[in-house]
Image (cartoon, rainbow, N blue to C red):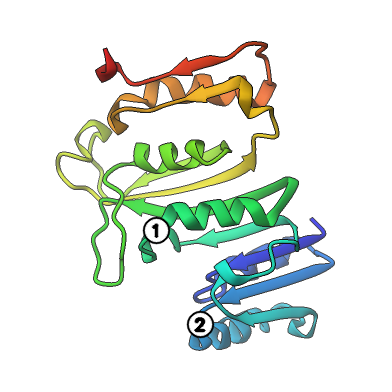
Amino acid sequence: CEQFIEIGAGHGYFTKLFLKYNNPSRTVICDISKTSLEMTKSIISETSNISNITFINKNFLELDVNNKYDFLIMGEVLEHVYDPVKFIKCARDYINSNGKIFISTCANCAQEDHLYRFNNINEIKNMILANNLIIEDDLICSSEDIDKDSWEKEKIAVNYCAILKKWNIDMKKVKIAFVRNYTIEPFLSIIRKILLEKKFETEFFITGYDDY
């Protein structure tokens, strides 16, 4: 990784861990909060030389989209904004063709400082796929030891993180539509396999069961 950026650093712990195992030639940390940036500087300085890091106190939607990065971290951000789709789209635009994005967020996690609530994990996956990104790997962790079929019904908070990458394919060949969020899970592994291996020659269309 040569070019690295974190969006919404918060406490800075994600970047601290990343820099512990990576040595990018360029590191940028952007947060709209001055307090968060100062906290991030303090935490990262414990293990890294922050003189080589660019700190930007700005809304990341206003950054120069011409600057591309190999890796982008956006941890615990999507639930704190009114329009997470806009943030996902911008994150996609800020990485290069082979770049990757790490996101973490949650579903059924109502908090005072959460401006957007995902009802289930499929809503998050749906949003990712609908914005020309593919889930390379992900992890789901429930806040309670309860069967996953009951998560949404019981309003159990569920944490989600994923590594995303651009599709880098001719989108004219692909048409995907999801009708109800909870109906798409059987298709996700198929979509991931097809897009990762790029094994298709004609258009295909996927929809939820409720469309029939």
Q: Earlier in the sequence, mark 2 or mark 1?
A: 2
In the image, residue 165 lies at what x, y percent? 64, 42
Location of residue 132 in the rendering, given as x and y in whole percent from the top left corner: 57, 38
Q: Quadrant of residue 65?
A: bottom right
55 left or right of 61? right
Q: Nearer the viewer, residue 143 or 135?
A: 135
Q: Quadrant of the C terminus?
A: top left
User: Measured along the vertical axis of the image, is residue 148 above or below residue 71?
Assistant: above
Residue 136 visible to the viewer: no
Nearer-the-camera pick, 35 or 172: 172
| Quadrant including the N terminus | bottom right
Q: Which residue is mark 1?
A: 83
Q: Position of residue 60 (x, y in %)?
A: 57, 70
Q: Nearer the viewer, residue 33 or 47?
A: 33
> Which residue is located at x 21 percent, y 40 percent?
152
Q: Is residue 119 above or below residue 70?
A: above
On the picture, is 26 further left or further right than 104?
right
Q: Residue at x 51, y 23 (%)?
A: 175
Q: Residues within 10 Å of mark 2 (few under 14, many from 20)?
A: some
Q: Which mark is residue 36?
A: 2
Label 1 SS: loop
- Name the residue at 23% across, 60% down: 110
Q: Is residue 101 left or right of residue 121?
A: right
| Residue type, numbered disc 2 | Ser
Residue 193, quarter of the rendered image: top right
Q: Amino acid at mark 1?
A: Asp
Which residue: 45% across, 63% down? 77
Discs 2, 1 touching: Cβ within 8 Å: no
